[in-house]
Image (tube, rainbow, N blue to C red):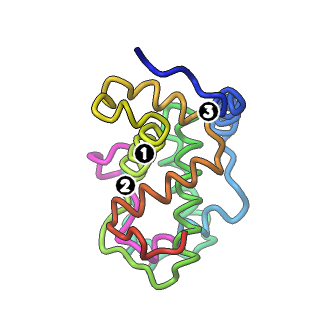
Amino acid sequence: MLPEQSEDNARDADWQRQRQRDGAAGRVPKDFYPGVWKLLKNCKGLVIGDKLESRNRLDSNPIVSEMTPGEKNFALRVERLLNKIHAPQYRQLTIEALLELMAIFERNPYLVLDDYIVLDVLTGHAVRLAWLDAHPERHDRYDEDKALAWSQFYQTSPFRCATYFVRAFQYLTNLQGDIAA
C-alpha cells in the first residue's frame, strides 16, 4: 500500500497550481538572465530540457566570451529553452532549480565545475531525495512510487524544494560538505 499524503503536503497543496500559473505565464524573477549568465562562468554549461538534444545545451565558453549578462540575445536563448518545456509546472521547477544553483555559486565563488549541469538530472534526483526522506520504508520501491513522488514534490514549497536541490547538487557533484548551502 502506498503512503498517505502527509499533512505538510496537504498544507502546501496550492504550490502545484502556483507553479502551473507562473510557468504558463513565463515569469522569471528580476535579474534571472544575468544570474544564469554568471552561473555559466562556473561550469562547462547547462542543459535545459532533454539532455540528449544538443540544442538544449548552453555552452559556457562561447556564451561568456561573446555575450554580456544583460544582452537580449542571451535572455532569448535561455527563454527559448525554457519555452520548450511543455509542462508549465516543470518549467517553473526548472527556474527554481536555476535560482538555487545561482545561490550556491554566489555563496561559493571559487566553486567551478568542469562539466555540464543537467537540470533534468538534478531535479529528478531532488524529487527522489525528497520522497525517500518522507518515505524511507519505500526505498527499494521508488520506481513504483515515482509518479506520486513527483506529484508531492510539485506540491512542496519552493523553500523546501530548494533544500533538495542543494542536496541533489551536493550528491551529484560529490561535494557533500564542501559547499555553503
- Comparing 131 with 106, the one in front is 131
Count neighbours of disc 2 (C-alpha within 10 A) and say few if under 14, some if 14 to 19, many if 20 or more: some
Q: Earlier in the sequence, mark 1 or mark 2?
A: 2
Rendered location of residue 26, percent (x, y): 65, 42
- Which residue has dot 2 on it? 118
Highlighted magenta segment, given as a residue range: 38-55
Of all residues, the one furthest to the top in this rendering is 1
Q: Classify 49 as above or below 146.
A: below
Residue pictured at 40% horizontal, 45% vertical:
49
Label 1 vs label 2: CA separation?
Answer: 17 Å
Residue pictured at 59% horizontal, 59% vertical:
99
Q: Classify 106 as above or below 36.
A: below
Q: Given this view, does label 3 or label 1 mark the residue nearer the observer?
A: 1
Residue 122 is inside the magenta segment = no
Local secondary structure at mark 2: strand
Rendered location of residue 144, percent (x, y): 32, 23
Tag 3 and tag 2, C-beta contact below 8 Å: no
Residue 11 tag number: none
- Which residue has dot 3 on it? 155
Local secondary structure at mark 1: helix
Where on the picture, by quarter, is residue 137?
Answer: top left
Q: Amino acid at mark 2?
A: Val
Residue 129 tag number: 1
